[in-house]
Amino acid sequence: MRVFYLTHPEVVIDREVHVPQWGLNEIGAARVDAALARDWWQGVTHVWASDEVKAMETAAPFCAALGIPLATDPGLAEIDRSRAGFIPEPEFSAVAEACFANPDQSVHGWEPAGVAQRRCCAAVDRALRGHEAGDLLLVGHGGVGAFLYAALAEREIGAVGTKPGGYGRVFAFDAGSRQIVGGWGAMEIGPTPLTS
């Protein structure tokens, strides 16, 4: 059984709206439609998503296509940045890099990366508990997705190759062994073959 971890695609950025309430923009919604036309997710029998709007809007069309309900887990939510408020670019990218580089510390009021990693891994364990047949699709965010990838690959947070490299990316791992079986790829294509 495979587990796919999919990050949400592009969103409407609105500094007047609390970040977890941001939804997909037109590009993001079109990318979800394009991913639905592919076959990498066809063996999925259950979908779990972060309880943030952008993740649920990404997951819901997959559930509709499969005829299954959407389950949510707040443990799949993105790095908690609520104490910092809205941070525009390029400062946002600088704070994000500092968060990855200092996983045991809160940077600019953000949830420490190590804490977010453990939270996300625990949510994955909950999703897998009792799941016996078919593939599983987890829909979340780039930051915690990178932390999950690093944990599965037994690499440090922020190590080369662990970050998704943009919005709307997906990787796959084996549910039993927890070994990564497909690297980060665009959602319109699916996970990429691993190179040795």
Image: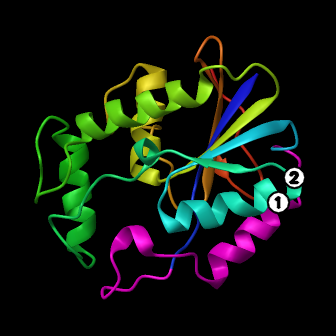
Marks 1/2: CA–CA distance: 5 Å
**Horizontal and vertical percent for residue 54?**
53, 67
> Which residue corresponds to mark 1?
64
Count residues near mark 2 (Cα–Cα under 10 Å), then give few for <14, some for 14-19, many for 20+: few
Instruction: Determine which of the numbered discs, if any, sits on residue 67 in the image.
Output: 2
Relative to 76, does residue 159 appear above or below in the rendering?
Answer: above
Count residues near mark 1 (Cα–Cα under 10 Å), then give few for <14, some for 14-19, many for 20+: few
Span colored in magenta: 12-40
**Horizontal and vertical percent for residue 142?**
46, 52
**Horizontal and vertical percent for residue 134?**
82, 28
> Can the viewer see residue 115 in this picture?
yes
Q: Quadrant of the N terminus?
A: top right
Query: Label 2's element?
Result: loop
183 horizontally vs 159: left or right: right
Query: Label 1's element?
Result: helix
In the rendered image, residue 29 lying in the magenta stretch gets the answer yes
Residue at image position (15%, 67%) is: 84
Residue at image position (43%, 29%) is: 121
**Horizontal and vertical percent for residue 193?**
72, 33
Q: Are marks 1 and 2 in contact (CB under 8 Å)?
A: yes
Total label count? 2
Amino acid bearing label 1: Ala
